[in-house]
Amino acid sequence: MEVVEQAVEAIRAGRPVVLPMDTVYGLATNPYREEATWRVYRLKGRPDTTPSALVAADFSSLFDCVPELFGRSGVIARALLPGPYTLVLPNPARRYLWLTGLDPETIGVRIPELEGPSRDILDRVGAVMATSANLHGGREPRALADVPQEIREGAALAIDGGELPGIPSTVLDFTGPEPRVLREGLVSGAEAIERALSAVA
């Protein structure tokens, strides 16, 4: 499919692409290239101290990106992913500092439930850095038409995946003494934490 090839080429080159995710439209790029992340942040008008998620196609890709996610972190990840969660987990090797914001000891990770071109693209590239395709502080885009024009024009490609839930992922922090819900999203954070703790018990 031509659109998949174009998106894969753009992401590998470090250019931003608008992708329909399982929650909202996201702005994605190459997670391994620092300058690619700053390009996304400039397009969004987002402070570079704000963390972004490392979004992987599957567990194999996730553990390739962050090999330290074993033991408790790996069990938690497998209990909740794939799904509409962003998990903040320990990052002892301080990987992807351009994604971690002010705390290099932690990293946010996702494995979304995708279909269509977005599934094919993520499978091809293995992982992306991703943030919602809105201007900083703006509303989450449910449809491609909700993505601000300047972002659509600044992206290498914008893929229309129809209407999405329009509610971002639930963000859960598992790095402290007690798990915390940092952002309530598409699904209940409290229920997810209970499921994760049951898995590691």
Image (cartoon, rainbow, N blue to C red):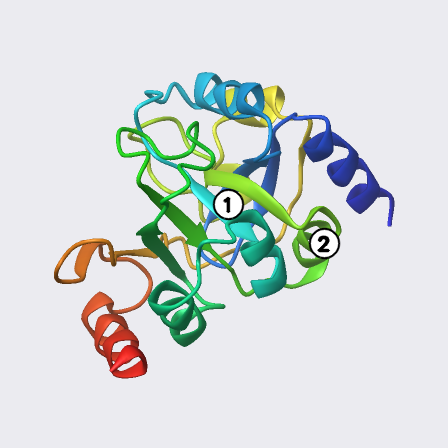
Quadrant in the picture for the C terminus:
bottom left
Q: Kindly identify which residue carries mark 1.
A: 25
Q: Position of residue 156 (x, y in %)?
A: 69, 26
Per the rendering, the mark at residue 191 is none
Q: Where in the figure is residue 175, as x and y percent of width and height?
A: 23, 54
Crowd band around label 1 with a 10 angstrom C-alpha radius: few (<14), some (14–19), many (20+) = many
Marks 1 & 2, CB-CB < 8 Å contact: no
Residue under the image location 12 percent in, 59 percent down: 177
Q: Residue at x 34, y 27 (%)?
A: 136
Instruction: Classify mark 2: helix, strand or loop.
Output: helix
Number of residue marks:
2
Q: Which class describes the residues within 10 Å of circle 2: few (<14), some (14-19), or many (20+)?
A: some
> As drawn, is 42 to the left or to the right of 60?
left
Badge 1 marks a residue whose secondary structure is strand
Q: Amino acid at mark 1?
A: Tyr
Q: Which amino acid lies under the numbered mark 2 shown in the image of this protein?
A: Pro
Q: Is residue 82 above or below residue 14?
A: below
Of the pair 198 and 23, the residue shown nearer to us: 198
| Image quadrant where residue 87 sits | bottom left
Q: Seen from this angle, which residue lies furthest left? A: 177
The image shows residue 40 at horizontal and vertical percentages of 51, 24
Residue name at image x 53 percent, y 25 percent: 151
Q: CA distance from mark 1 to mark 2?
A: 13 Å
Tell me if residue 61 comes above or below residue 130 in the rendering: below
**x%, y% of residue 113?**
54, 65
Which image quarter: residue 180?
A: bottom left
Q: Quadrant of residue 71?
A: bottom left
Sequence-first tag of 1 and 2: 1
Q: Is residue 19 left or right of residue 95?
A: right
Q: Which residue is mark 2?
A: 117
